[in-house]
Image (cartoon, rainbow, N blue to C red):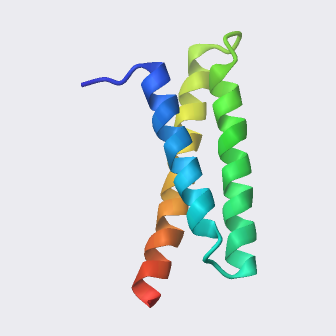
Amino acid sequence: MLLTREQELAILEQELLANKEISQYYNPLTRAILEQLMSLLYEAQATFNNSSNDDRTRILAIEKQKHILNLIQTIKEYKDDRE
């Protein structure tokens, strides 16, 4: 099942909120890295939302979002493994 653009953005927003809440439990360096990744994610979302962009740019923005979310997930998993 393909998600609509609004559904995808809602999922990404939920991820961001969850990661922001979780980030308070990390050390300052990891927290700073997570904050930078979230900033990049917002930029990618803005690029995606810009209706003047062509399909290629939007696809690249989606790929960037996926990559950033994977990095955030890796950090979360690493912390879980260390506990």
> For the point 62% across and 58% down, which residue is it?
20
Question: In the picture, residue 22 is in which quadrant?
Answer: bottom right
> For the point 58% across and 32% down, which residue is it?
60
Vertical position of residue 49 compared to residue 65: above or below: above
In x, y percent, where is residue 7? 43, 26
Question: In the picture, residue 1 is in which quadrant?
Answer: top left
Q: Nearer the viewer, residue 2 or 27?
A: 27
Name the residue at the left extreme: 1
In x, y percent, where is residue 10? 49, 32
In x, y percent, where is residue 83? 44, 89
Q: Which of 24 and 50 is in front in this view?
A: 24
Vertical position of residue 38 compared to residue 25: above or below: above
> For the point 40% across and 84% down, which residue is it?
81
In x, y percent, where is residue 79? 50, 80
Locate residue 63 relative to residue 35 in the image: left or right: left
Vertical position of residue 45 compared to residue 71: above or below: above
Q: Which of 27 and 74 is in front in this view?
A: 27
